[in-house]
Image (cartoon, rainbow, N blue to C red):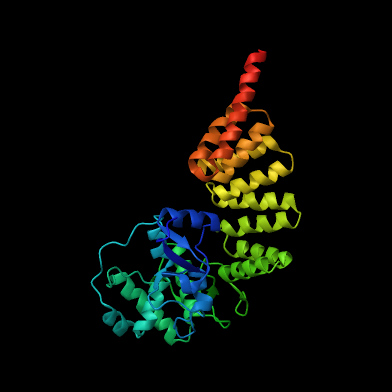
Amino acid sequence: MTASAERVYVVGRIKGLTRRRLEQLSAAAGLTLTRRSMAADAIVLGHGAAGRAVSDAGELRLGFGRKASARLLSEQAFRVRLGLDSAPVAPGQHGEDELARHSGLTAAQLQTLALFDVLAPAGGRYAFADLVTARAAGQLHASGARFPSIIAAAQALERRGERLSSVRLAEAPWGAVLQVFEGALAEIDGQLLLPLDGPDVDADDAFARAEEAEQDGDLAAARRWYETAGRLDPADPVAPFNLGNVLDELGLPLEAEIAYRRAIARSPDMADAWFNLGVLQEKLGRDAEALASYERALAADRTYADALHNAALLRMRRREFAAAVPLLEQMRALAPAEAVEIGRLAHLCRLELQAAATER
């Protein structure tokens, strides 16, 4: 990491990424994450932050200080910067004034929608699909729907490959934006609801509350909220992954293993879940299973230094020195600052191999 690396402050979370993976991708892109908003050169707005960062009227209210020069980035723009997604295609044919005129929304409201990826401008211009989506958002807002609810509905539809303009929506009595399905209210995923039924929180709200409880040391509350987040968003692997960490801290290894495996079922190449599962299995004395889990973590991420470290030391404890040496050599390439200690371990392995060969 260089001293000149651009500093990024992330509001909310970037869906599907653990903190370790986010830091790794950021470093590879020449960025460094910071927990100080005033030190940031760019502010990234995670999708889940809309509930607390956007007013009912669509105004951005970050609630923290930032440098005047700090740029605002949407989650999608950040993913492009990290190399996870492709950049938008060529700019559209419609300007912001035209969208405002057709939708009844202000320029500030349109910019809020763009910052949460409801609209996808390229080069300051919008495609026709954006114009139609802005019109749908304007109609919902005119009918009384709150902007955070509009954004949440748009993002849920996006995960289904649809847009606000593609389905009939209405505001529920408790403020959520729901789909109108054959005269009845339904969640965006199509699940029918009773007229007065409705959740108090969505998946992102539950996840944020779980993180806050975990940071405060209230592991019991964190467990409940991560379980809720995992139920509300059955595609998200990070909620069960974090739940596994909490359960492990609570001294519930079998429950933690189930949570890690649930995360892996949702994202089979989730290196962090494989690694933590390996750590758990190693603590339980299931060394062969732990090695297999570390290998799966490394198959998903060849630069996972902690997985290399644990696998190498476990191989050494099992006196599998020939298998430990290449793992240590990979570690040395990844961690030059620890080259001396790693070299010492590799030397010990080679001495053991020489001694075994002499005995034969």
Q: Position of residue 220 (x, y in %)?
A: 73, 65
Q: Is residue 358 shown above or below 290?
A: above
231 sits to left or right of 51: right
Residue furthest to the front: 340
Q: Position of residue 61 (x, y in %)?
A: 48, 81
Q: Can residue 117 be seen from the camera position used here?
A: no
Residue furthest to the left: 93
The N terminus - image quarter: bottom left
User: Which is more toward the observer, 136 or 279?
Assistant: 279
Q: How many marks?
A: 0
Q: Position of residue 43 (x, y in %)?
A: 44, 71
**Image point 66% across, 53% down: which residue?**
259
**Image point 69% across, 52% down: which residue?**
256
User: Which is more toward the observer, 145 or 224?
Assistant: 224
Answer with the quarter of the image where residue 193 lies. bottom right
User: Which is more toward the observer, 70 or 293?
Assistant: 70
124 sits to left or right of 71: left
The C terminus - image quarter: top right
Q: Is residue 231 shown above or below 354?
A: below
